[in-house]
């Protein structure tokens, strides 16, 4: 919908913008996000977009958009769009390839993972500026004592586990990711033969990985 109060005779009216000039997050040259909203193009109505570039196994972290529905369109590559349905209490995993879309209703927790290199996604919102709350902020800003008390967890272990999260992640794993070494008990459990389980079907671009380097 057009902005009814816009003075379209004004010399400041904008009809064109280069989205490449507004990179709002950059992990590296293969993983970054460009943004277009009403602050960049003042004739926009209730629409905005994120221009997302990802390499294989990189994830737009779990997050919500509290003010907008999101339509994710795959331009190139392939991705897995995952969302939690708050009514059925189930996790939905939607693989998309070029020309396919996945829709996330307003306020639903979701994330996107590239399953191949050179993945390019376009996220379209029905709001002039897409608001964002990342899971990294929820985890790092909620006191470990509150998490431990609420969910009956060991506070020291919660604090130790979440200590590396010091900023909003946006695209993970972080560039400086150094997973904590496993304890002897965890190493012994890993050595025991067991069937590998994943929270979604055929991860990593549908290529079986016997020793995956990323854990979700």
Image: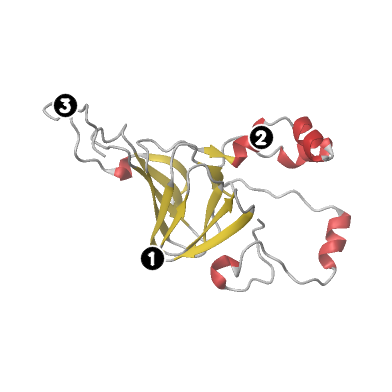
Q: Is residue 59 visible?
A: no
Q: Nearer the viewer, mark 3 or mark 1?
A: 3
**Residue 100 screen position, x and y as percent:** 40, 64
Give the class, few, some or many, for how many residues have Cα within 10 Å of label 1's Cα (few <14, many ≥20): some
Q: CA distance from mark 2 to mark 1?
A: 35 Å
Q: Secondary structure at mark 2?
A: helix
Q: Residue furthest front?
A: 87
Dot 1 corresponds to which residue?
Answer: 98
Q: Residue at x 80, y 71 (%)?
A: 194
Label at residue 7 = 3
Left or right: where does residue 175 sit relative to residue 7?
A: right
Secondary structure beneath label 1: loop
Q: Tell which circle, 2 or 3, labels the residue nearer the N-terminal end.
A: 3
| Residue topped by disc 2 | 140
Residue 102: x and y, percent? Answer: 45, 58
Q: Quadrant of residue 35?
A: top left
Q: 14 above or below 57?
A: above
Q: CA distance from mark 3 to mark 1?
A: 38 Å
* In the depicted structure, whether residue 9 falls above or below residue 112: above
Quadrant housing the N terminus:
top left
Pick the residue in front: 158 or 72.
72
Q: Position of residue 114 (x, y in %)?
A: 50, 59
Residues 192 and 15: in front is: 15
């Amino acid at each position: 919908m057009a902005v009814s109060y816009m003075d379209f005779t004004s010399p400041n009216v904008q009809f064109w913008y280069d989205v490449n000039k507004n990179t709002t997050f950059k992990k590296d040259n293969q993983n970054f996000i460009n943004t277009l909203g009403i602050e960049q193009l003042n004739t926009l109505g209730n629409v905005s977009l994120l221009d997302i570039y990802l390499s294989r196994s990189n994830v737009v972290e779990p997050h919500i958009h509290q003010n907008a529905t999101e339509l994710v369109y795959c331009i190139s590559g392939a991705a897995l769009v995952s969302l939690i349905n708050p009514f059925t209490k189930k996790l939905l995993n939607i693989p998309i390839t070029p020309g396919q879309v996945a829709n996330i209703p307003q306020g639903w927790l979701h994330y996107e993972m590239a399953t191949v290199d050179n993945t390019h996604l376009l996220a379209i919102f029905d709001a002039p500026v897409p608001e964002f709350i990342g899971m990294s902020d929820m985890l790092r800003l909620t006191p470990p004592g509150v998490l431990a008390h609420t969910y009956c967890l060991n506070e020291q272990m919660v604090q130790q586990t979440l200590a590396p999260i010091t900023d909003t992640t946006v695209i993970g794993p972080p560039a400086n990711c150094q997973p904590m070494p496993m304890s002897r008990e965890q190493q012994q459990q890993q050595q025991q033969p067991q069937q590998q389980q994943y929270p979604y079907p055929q991860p990593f671009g549908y290529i079986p990985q016997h020793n995956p380097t990323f854990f979700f």
